[in-house]
Amino acid sequence: MRILPVLAVASLSTTLIAAPAAASTTTLGPTAYGYGGAVATVDPTATAVGLDVLRRGGNAVDAAIATAATLGVTEPFSAGIGGGGFFVYYDAKHRRVSTIDGREAGPATMTSTYFIDPADGLPYDFPEARVSGLSAGVPGTVATWETAANSWGTQSLAKLLKPAAAVADRGFAVDAIFRQQVADNAAAFGQFDATSAIYLPGGQPPAVGSTQRNPDLADTYRLIARTGADGFYRGGVAADIVRTVQHPPVSTHPIGTWAYPIRPGALTLQDLARYEAPRRAPTRSDFRGLSIYGMSTPSSGGTAVAEALNILEQSGLSAADRTKVLHYYLEASALSFADRGRYVGAYTPKPVLEKLASDRWARQRACQISPSAALTKPVPPGDINAQGCTPASVGGPTEQGQATTNLTVADKWGNVVEYTFTIEQIGGNAMVVPGRGFLLNNELTDFNFTNTQAPAADPNLPGPGKRPRSSMSPTIVLKDGKPFLALGSPGGSTIITTVLQVLVNRLILGQSLPDAMAAPRASQRNSAGIQAEPAFHTTYGPALTALGHTFGPDAAELGAATAVEFTGHGGFVASAEPVRRGGGTAGVVHPNR
Ligand code: GLU
């Protein structure tokens, strides 16, 4: 667990490095109770920055932007201005949920065979596709922040970038996870001087406890502060991004060896200049009187979570029988993933999305679940045109899927931000844009390289300017039109099941939010074997196996969620992971426990 002495929050500008722990009496941990505003992230410095903005009168949007910019410094392998994400916002004054689609976009010249090697007609191996210019889409993060600040913020983007720039200048202490993320990427990072200069000092991952600085990133933040998003999408930064993509800056003296050719990509200055982070209508579904709002396409998170919850609602489960609840959770998740794979991509028509999130569709799918015997996986997708208990549609199974970070912020006025953003794999495409201090994403590898649904069409093949399908599932739950819970997580396609499982734990099993977050996780994404954390496998494996479930290899951990629950009368429970990813940090403006 990473703990930040509260003293560092109070005087952030001078205590980012080696805050004087001896002087502090309170610490920020994974759970906080209180009022006045709440922030939960994976990182103590980012949470502290968000709390500081709230304390000085900023609203949830202001705090979310400042927090996100700080995560771009301290969690650079998971998220940052070289990537994209989805921002979901509940506006208390207008009682409205809005979203911003800051997903990366592919080049205008991208075709369905983008990831097929012309030399042999076969798809590129994943590492070859990832560490290339091909994989980088137009980053959406800066446009997202500007849109959010202009639409709902009370402070300028320039002001909100200041604390993060200060962290980048002054540095922060490297922890074990940061070091490990570099070590896992050392061969890829070592191919690019701009990356190894920042992250492989002396040719090695930085030592735990050493100070990590990034003055180039601080300068890039200051440039954005002066010039706005235009300064990123046009002009010098855009030119540097395009040059990096089109002519990957491969070192003449690489550190270590990389087994694949490093291919150029096709992004152009026009692709960057044309980029927009549009506001989109959220997905909406109901669960036991609660309204569940999520992210629509190009994310599949909103519809997949909605469909699975609707299926679970059909089964009328109670907390009394935990095995049965977990059985239905796994079955509903597999059915929902089958439909996601078959139907959901950037251009899925609205009526199809609405149908997938409807109670009628849930009845058609829920009728396939037996209380006593697990379905054989993978299950086929349902036929969207059929009536009644759905005959299977033609088409193949779905895919598997890790990086990304998530933050939750709520303010004293009742506004809430749930924001998940990413550079796709941990370390993105491994290329720091020279002189600019940020890693580029490899988000375009979220497209399917070949048709996974043949003979049916695959909704997630690459296409001109298209945005790849995501699993990011920032979710806001309203009760009687007011916020009750907000949550999200990283974890590739396991994001959907992590968000769903925390909701199942909280809403069906009746666990407290911190317990719902800490509980062991399992993910059934319509594959032969369930991917479970060891504690889940040990505890529930025997009973679920008796029902016919099959377990695949265990995962050390699934997700790194953050959440805030509204407890009434202005109170909050802010919750981050107690253990996963080294433990997260939740804080409230006025603690009362
Ligand atoms: N690129 C993934 C998505 O958009 C997220 C990556 C991750 O969380 O590992 O679904």
Image (cartoon, rainbow, N blue to C red):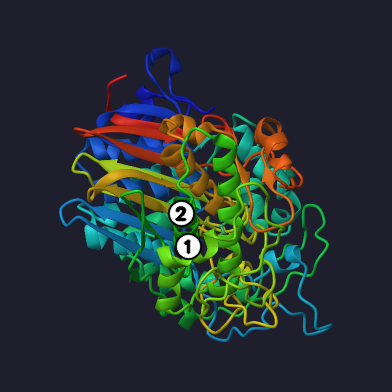
- Identify the residue position indicated by label 2 in the image: 314
Camera-nearest residue between 429 and 367: 367
Quadrant containing ligand 1 reads bottom right
Q: Give the structural element (helix, strand or loop) at label 2.
A: helix
Mark 2 surroundings: few (<14), some (14-19) or many (≥20) residues within 10 A? some
At 73% from the left and 62% from the top, the residue drawn is 251
Q: Is mark 1 within 8 Å of ligand 1?
A: no
At 64% from the left and 39% from the top, the residue drawn is 557
Give x and y (percent) for residue 523. Answer: 62, 48
Question: Is residue 46 in sight in this rendering?
Answer: no
Give x and y (percent) for residue 76. Answer: 54, 49
Mark 1 surroundings: few (<14), some (14-19) or many (≥20) residues within 10 A? some
Identify the disc placed on residue 76: none
Give x and y (percent) for residue 544. Answer: 68, 40
**Amino acid bearing label 1:** Arg
> Do callouts 2 and 1 mark residues in contact (Cβ within 8 Å)?
yes
At 44% from the left and 56% from the top, the residue drawn is 310
Count of picture labels: 2
Task: Indicate the quadrant where residue 111 lies.
Answer: bottom right
Q: Which quadrant does the C terminus fall into?
A: top left
- Identify the residue position indicated by label 1 in the image: 363
**Amino acid bearing label 2:** Gln
Camera-nearest residue between 160 and 485: 485
Q: Which quadrant does the N terminus fall into?
A: top right
Task: Indicate the quadrant where residue 193 lies.
Answer: bottom right
Q: Give the structural element (helix, strand or loop) at label 1.
A: helix
Q: Is residue 47 left or right of residue 177?
A: left
Q: CA distance from mark 2 to mark 1?
A: 7 Å
Give the farthest residue toward the left. 93
